Image (spheres, rainbow, N blue to C red):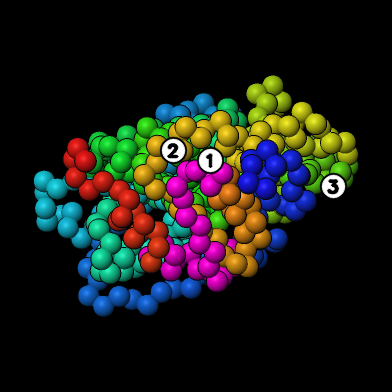
Amino acid sequence: MRRAHAVIAKWSMRMSAIVLAATASARLMAQVETEVPPVVAGARPVTVEHIKIHGAALEGNLEGDAVDRDAVVFLPPGYGKESRRRYPVVYALHGYWIGAEQWTHEIHVPQTLEGAFAQGAREVILVLPDSKTQYNGSLYSSSVTTGDFESYVARDVVNYVDTHYRTLRDRRSRGLVGHSMGGYGAARIGMKHPDVFGSLYIMSPCCLSPRAPAPADPETDKSLATLATPADSAKLAWGLRVRLATAAAWSPNPKNPPLFLDLPTKDGVVQPEVMAKWTANALLSFIDQYIGNLRKFHGIALDVGDQDSLRSDTSRLHEVLDAYDIPNTLEIYAGTHTSAVADRFQNHVMPFFSQNLCFKAGC
């Protein structure tokens, strides 16, 4: 169980895509209904900026997703007063179905960020980039259909922030955190770009293990085949949009209009080549290729709720890191997939980066 190949030898028998703890649209919408930690007395306000970041890596995407994308930036209390001071940056990735603005409500920023600073966390700039697509999520992957969201986060967003704000332009001063689909994104982007980020916090990550295809259903295949544009998917059930999002990210096909993707079943028959591509993108399938990169991180933390269906896979990721003697921590806390993310963000995520990021030039 401690070796990665033993972990990936079994197909996951549950729907382990994207949010994964949710089984219906109503549960997904509950992502923004998280428990709010108490307001910390004496907390100083941060400055909130809503900006657009151009994605060179997203240009020409076949799905028609926006290239100029929303982002929310939180500047610490001291930013406007100390004009020569430079700050580390934490990039926080949202989950499936929600965007950057909805993510602010889920983790209750700026309140939790202000609370973290008031309780002793060192001041950083916080950036929430948006990765919501036609099918409600990019999986932070690289695809001609959706665009290269992996490079968008690691290059376009980071470069924009470094050129528009007073940042410490060093990998050791950049942290990456994400929840659910964003947890997968933080792990995927982090392990591929240790030259950009220095510390990782992975919250309830989805998409770690390979999974079995959905039961073959010719009627479902037929309904998907009638879609004339990606926008037409808005009328579909949540599960079908998950399937389309996964296909757009992991099995793109520029020769298959109008959706430019290949689905895992066709005419009720499982397509092994497509499933092989999906398996190749399950994080536990490719982590062994990036062990050297993971050794470069100053800190790696994982957490997951004890009532979260992602608990097992998150524990397996921890076991793989342990097997390679890569320092990391795993905390299994009392909660569901979404119930405690605001508390975790204030009282665990921000203190983690306070301890693991570099807060001065040349450190």
The reply to whether dot 2 and dot 1 touch (C-beta < 8 Å) is yes
| 223 is higher (above) or lower (below) than 250 | below
Could you tell me the amino acid type at mark 1? Tyr
Task: Say whether residue 246 is left or right of residue 35.
Answer: right
Give the Cα separation between the discs numbered 1 and 3.
36 Å
Task: Say whether residue 21 is left or right of residue 35.
Answer: right
Q: Nearer the viewer, mark 2 or mark 1?
A: 1
Q: Residue at x 65, y 65 (%)?
A: 26
| 351 is higher (above) or lower (below) than 93 | below
Q: State the SS at label 2.
A: loop
Q: State the SS at label 1.
A: loop
Q: Nearer the viewer, mark 3 or mark 2?
A: 2
In reply to whether residue 162 is colored magenta, the answer given is: no
Could you tell me the amino acid type at mark 2? Arg
Residue 283 in view (yes/no) = yes
Q: Quadrant of the C terminus?
A: top left
Mark 3 — residue?
Answer: 215
For residue 63, which quarter of the picture?
Answer: top right
Residue 91 in view (yes/no) = no
In reply to whether residue 338 is colored magenta, the answer given is: yes
User: Label 3: how many residues lie within 10 Å, few (<14), some (14-19) or many (20+)?
Assistant: few
In the image, which residues are magenta? 321-346
Mark 1 — residue?
Answer: 324
Q: Residue at x 67, y 48 (%)?
A: 1
